[in-house]
Amino acid sequence: MARIAGIELPRGKRADIALTYIYGIGRTSATKILEQTGINPDIRVKDLTEEDEAKLRECLEGYVVEGDLRRQTALDIKRMMEIGCYRGVRHRKGL
């Protein structure tokens, strides 16, 4: 089972698609990560070796993902609401 950044990646998906299940990683970032690690994007998650998973974990240390990114986003929204900017007002109204 490939568990990266606290997320269980779906076993039947291709590696480039499965990485997008991590909050903060999109298609472009997933492609760059796989190029940096030298992993074939067409390989299925169930076929990844332990070394491949370790490479992915090591490469993702440079990215802000999951809990840290969610916390940072929530703090940004809270700051906008406190200063009363247009975007903050829209968040306060729930629009």
Image: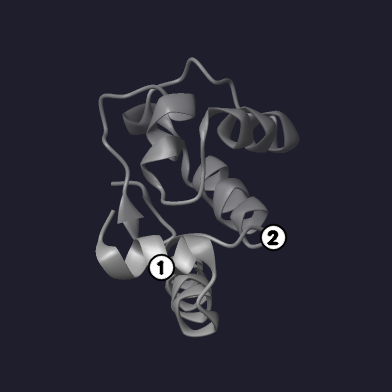
Amino acid type at circle 1 is Val
Mark 2 vs mark 1: in front: 1
* Vertical comparison of 33 with 8: above or below: above
Amino acid type at circle 2 is Gly
What kind of colouring is applied to the model shown? one colour
Residue 89 is tagged as 1
* Vertical comparison of 22 with 77: above or below: above
Q: Position of residue 20 (x, y in %)?
A: 43, 37
Per the image, the residue denoted by label 2 is 62
Q: Are discs 2 and 1 less than 8 Å apart at CB?
A: no
For the point 56% across and 45% down, which residue is it? 51
Query: Dot 1, crowdedness within 10 Å: few (<14), some or many (≥20)?
Result: some
Q: Which residue lies furthest to the right in this view?
A: 36
For the point 26% across and 36% down, which residue is it? 10
* Vertical comparison of 46 with 1: above or below: above
* Vertical comparison of 3 with 31: above or below: below
Q: Looking at this view, is 24 or 9 the one in front?
A: 24
Q: Looking at this view, is 78 or 63 the one in front?
A: 78
Q: In terms of image quadrants, where is residue 45?
A: top left
Mark 2 lies on a secondary structure that is loop
Q: How far apart are marks 2 and 1 (CA)?
A: 33 Å
For the point 28% across and 46% down, which residue is it? 1
Query: Dot 2, crowdedness within 10 Å: few (<14), some or many (≥20)?
Result: few
Q: Residue furthest top?
A: 42
